[in-house]
């Protein structure tokens, strides 16, 4: 009998391994279906080019200038020595260290972002299995996340947002495991990953704060035994520690940027109440007309709306704890949206903060459907509907991604792409690594400098290129000017200050 139980246990473990392996192959299949293989080794381009090159600048800041973790820096010298800080730079630091092994391969940053994001998806799948007790429903809800073009685009990109989301999903898995099994390891791991998520993007603090709200609500309004009180106390302590750690880092970056006179990164809220009514309407038009189809495929949003209505109608029949948690998460998302409302005009990835809430609404909607009927055949039909919406939505996202991958260069990326195109000839100039350069016109502070792998200054617009500014930067130590225009007057000005050492279409290099 003992041997039979052992064999059954082994079979159960094998089934889990088979499911996990199948899920891994599914993620790989989605990766190729979305066309990421053609983008694998490519550098920053397309939407939010500026933020992509900023992230890579932090990597090179460590690689080129020593690995002093708490002194991140950029190529752009508008701050003292290029020193500036934003999100917790752990990923940039790891990639910079990996340069010592693999060479300066910039795609390593987006690869590590992808691995963290997809690891988070795997833990989300496990979390949903625990909540729904149904592997097929769990899988289908996870697949709906891939109908989000925003998630797909940034999952294999240079921005840290989907890595923060991946850590957040892992945190949710372990807090649920702690709820079910009361393991100390689970509560520690949960808030470790929530802390990493919040350190990469402070806005993801919404999720541990939502847990904190649920804990306080439960403690005040529910009757608890001694064991439950201990669990509540542990959760409260680790929630507060997580929030404290993230706020300490943000206090540090505020002080660091102030000391180094860096104003490149926004480190404060941009609330809705600071806007006029016409400005509020303009941002809303971007959200509702321009961005909303990349947040999720329209069919996914329609399904979500139906399930939200169902949950409202069946609220008393659904798990109160889970529903209450969703309400606290919703309050957090609304608060965040009001505090950072202005950012939604130009930053589609800000919507990723709501991804866990959307997933929980889908899961709770399924629980609501079960509260109506457990008929097997009804749920087969519902799963088929979910499957069709997921397949159609993922294909929709693939087409949207293709448009993003093949977007034409704009003024923001123009100068950097000219530098990249002529990099072979530029390398032949043997410009010392320690040399400081001027780029103009260049609308990205770190774009051209990244491809040149040199520190310096960017002059945004052609009409700002004058003798006063050039001589000012020359006095700061600039040794070379990269003039990105065929304007004859600007070329004469450059020639009066230095000698032309390279001429290409839309590119003239001068040595002072």
Image: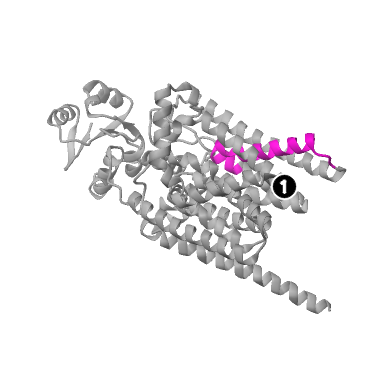
State the residue at coordinates (61%, 35%). 331
Q: Is residue 185 visible?
A: no
Is 402 placed above or below 282 here? below
Place of residue 95 in the rendered image (x, y in percent of width and height, measured from the top left): 48, 49
Q: Is residue 247 magenta?
A: no
Is 504 placed above or below 103 here? above
Place of residue 138 in the rendered image (x, y in percent of width and height, measured from the top left): 60, 59
Magenta region, residue range: 196-224
Camera-side residue: 279 or 5?
Answer: 279
Image position of 91 (left or right of 470): right
Q: Is residue 209 magenta?
A: yes
Image position of 53 (left or right of 218): left
Residue density around tag 1, few if under 14, some if 14–19, many if 20 or more, within 10 Å:
many
Camera-side residue: 271 or 113?
Answer: 271
Camera-side residue: 474 or 145?
Answer: 145
Camera-side residue: 84 or 406?
Answer: 406
Place of residue 233 in the rendered image (x, y in percent of width and height, measured from the top left): 78, 39
State the residue at coordinates (61%, 55%). 123
Is 57 placed above or below 406 here? above
Image position of 407 (left or right of 8): left
Place of residue 29 in the rendered image (x, y in percent of width and height, measured from the top left): 46, 64
Instruction: State the quadrant of the C terminus.
Output: top left
Instruction: State the quadrant of the N terminus.
Output: bottom right
Q: Quadrant of residue 366?
A: bottom right
Secondary structure beneath dot 1 equals helix
Q: Quadrant of residue 199?
A: top right
State the residue at coordinates (51%, 61%). 387
Image position of 494 (left or right of 386): left
Residue on which disc 1 sits: 187
């Amino acid at each position: 009998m003992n041997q039979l139980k052992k064999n059954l246990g082994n079979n159960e473990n094998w089934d889990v391994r088979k499911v996990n392996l199948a899920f891994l192959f599914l993620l790989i299949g989605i990766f190729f279906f979305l066309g990421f293989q053609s983008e694998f080794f490519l550098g920053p381009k397309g939407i939010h080019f500026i933020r992509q090159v900023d992230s890579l600048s932090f990597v090179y800041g460590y690689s080129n200038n020593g690995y002093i973790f708490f002194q991140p820096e950029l190529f752009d010298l508008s701050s003292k020595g290029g020193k500036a800080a934003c999100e917790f730079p752990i990923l940039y630091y790891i990639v910079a260290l990996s340069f010592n092994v693999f060479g300066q391969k910039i795609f390593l940053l987006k690869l590590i972002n992808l691995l963290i994001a997809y690891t988070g998806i795997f833990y989300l799948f496990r979390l949903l299995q625990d909540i729904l007790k149904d592997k097929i429903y769990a899988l289908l809800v996870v697949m709906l996340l891939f109908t989000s073009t925003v998630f797909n685009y940034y999952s294999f990109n240079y921005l840290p947002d989907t890595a923060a989301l991946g850590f957040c999903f892992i945190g949710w898995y372990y807090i649920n495991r702690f709820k079910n099994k009361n393991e100390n390891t689970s509560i520690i791991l949960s808030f470790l990953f929530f802390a990493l998520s919040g350190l990469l993007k402070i806005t993801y603090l919404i999720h541990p704060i939502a847990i904190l709200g649920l804990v306080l609500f439960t403690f005040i309004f529910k009757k608890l035994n001694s064991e439950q009180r201990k669990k509540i106390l542990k959760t409260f302590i680790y929630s507060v520690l997580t929030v404290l750690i993230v706020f300490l880092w943000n206090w540090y970056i505020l002080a660091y940027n102030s000391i180094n006179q860096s104003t490149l990164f926004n480190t404060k809220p941009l609330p809705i109440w600071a806007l006029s009514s016409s400005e509020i309407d303009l941002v809303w038009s971007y959200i509702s007309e321009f961005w909303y189809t990349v947040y999720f495929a329209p069919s996914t949003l329609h399904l979500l709306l139906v399930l939200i209505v169902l949950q409202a109608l069946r609220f008393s029949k659904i798990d109160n704890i889970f529903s209450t948690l969703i309400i606290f998460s919703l309050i957090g998302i609304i608060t965040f949206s009001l505090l950072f409302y202005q950012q939604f005009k130009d930053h589609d990835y800000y919507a990723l903060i709501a991804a866990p809430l959307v997933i929980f609404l889908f899961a709770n909607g399924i629980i609501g459907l079960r509260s109506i009927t457990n008929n097997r055949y009804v749920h087969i039909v519902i799963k088929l509907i979910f499957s069709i919406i997921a397949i159609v939505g993922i294909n929709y996202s693939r087409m949207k991604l293709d448009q993003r991958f093949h977007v034409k260069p704009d003024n923001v990326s123009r100068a950097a792409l000219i530098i990249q195109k002529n990099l072979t000839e530029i390398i032949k100039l043997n410009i010392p690594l320690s040399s400081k350069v001027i780029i103009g016109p260049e609308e990205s502070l770190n774009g051209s400098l990244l491809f040149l792998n040199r520190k310096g200054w960017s002059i945004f617009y052609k009409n700002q290129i004058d003798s006063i500014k050039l001589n000012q930067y020359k006095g700061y130590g600039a040794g070379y000017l990269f003039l990105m225009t065929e304007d004859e007057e600007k070329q004469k000005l450059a020639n009066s200050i230095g000698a032309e050492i390279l001429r290409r279409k839309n590119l003239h290099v001068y040595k002072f």
